[in-house]
Amino acid sequence: MQTLSVSSLNEQIKTLLETSFTRVFVEGELSRITYHNSGHIYFTLKDSASAISAVMFRGNASKLKFTLEEGMKVILDGAITLYKPRGTYQINCFTIEPAGQGALALAYEQLKQKLQAQGYFAKELKKQLPRFPRKIALVTSATGAALQDMLKVAQNRYRDIEIDIYDALVQGESASSSIVEAIQLADTKAYDIIIVGRGGGSIEDLWAFNEEIVADAIYNASTPIISAVGHEIDSVISDFVADLRAPTPSAAMQMCLPDTNELLQYLDTISNQFATHTAQKLQAKLQEIEHLKSLYAQNSIDTKITQKLQEIQSLKQNYSYVVDNLLKVAQNQVQSLRKMLESSHPKFKVKKGFAQVSQNSQVISIESLDVDDEFELMSDTLKLSAKVLKKENIL
């Protein structure tokens, strides 16, 4: 019996396995996933009873649309191979599909959740589109029908606009890179709006707008961006990241450009409103001027002089009457004072058998005198000097 070296045995096993299992489809659950910095992906595929190692080399891994996750059920398309240095066999994966779900649909949901968690869809970050843009950049295929549709809408809707076309691949493996380069270039040219879009197609046709690098380019742009991809029923990642989503490329132009006819009608309305408002303001100012003129006339120097002259004339006319009244009032006052004087004069106060008692030229009461006090008695015709000899109360 021939004796084999370990290497020879492994080589024979490798040849047997690789010729017997050139193409296998295996369904199982992913486990122990490792994304190596070389670009290769290593993992284990298992079911309830057993497990097998697997590898997806960089060339095939670069085409994988979704991210492998622990516990995910998948279907592998590959071949059985032996790793001679260790003597272990594994599946060399060509493609991987999610079990029960398309790879693109899964990749779409994974990226959508990732970007949403990073804040790419936040409404507060959406940039406001100018109402009257002057320069617009179109990132699309220069030979596509979508471009002609957009140009036609612009021609019919609003001609006072500068439109520049940034030709980009919108389908295929290189499309995402082409779109990113066009967006980044247009973003440096001070456009008012950038429209990124293409016509309808399958999910594969539109996939470039679901790539993360396109989402990053839109998110990092300083220019407001409209995503106008496919038809209204189509939904791509760029729609969520862009500042505005348009259901179609044509709708994008309608949404960002004003309608010339509507503008003309609006200008007519504004003109009428301006004329009416101006007339009302003018009428109000004229009334205010008339009021001021009236106030001025009432308070002017000429008016005040006229009023004073009228007052003087009135005083002249009433002078005699006023003087007579003043004289009568004065006479009445003199008469009243005379009566008061007469009533105070001793001449009119003394009655028969009575005399005024005074002391030191001051009128006093008789009760204030004491024995030996000297005092005067005075009538209207006679003054006597006297002395108290005796003081006696009568009552």
Image (cartoon, grey):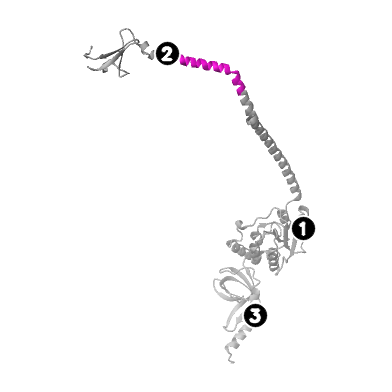
Res. 20 mark: 3
Q: Secondary structure at mark 2?
A: helix
Above or below, comparing residue 330 to residue 100 in the picture: above
Q: CA distance from mark 3 to mark 1?
A: 59 Å
Residue 102 visible in image? no
The residue carrying mark 1 is 151
Q: Which mark sits nearer the N-terminus, 3 or 2?
A: 3
- Residue at image location 61% in from the left, 86% down from the top: 11
Q: In the rendering, at what x and y percent does residue 131 appear? A: 69, 53
Q: Secondary structure at mark 3?
A: helix
The mark nearer the N terminus, 3 or 1, is: 3
Residue type beneath disc 2: Lys
Closest to the camera, between mark 3 and mark 1, is 1
Q: Which residue is mark 2?
A: 339
- Marks 2 and 1: which is nearer the front? 2
**The residue under label 3 is which amino acid type?**
Ser
Q: Quadrant of residue 251?
A: bottom right
Q: Nearer the viewer, residue 286 or 26?
A: 286
CB atoms at circles 3 and 2 under 8 Å apart? no
Q: Which quadrant of the figure has residue 90?
A: bottom right
Magenta stretch holds residue 314: yes
The magenta-colored residue range is: 311-337
How far across and down, in percent of the image, does residue 48 sit? 54, 71
Secondary structure under badge 1? helix
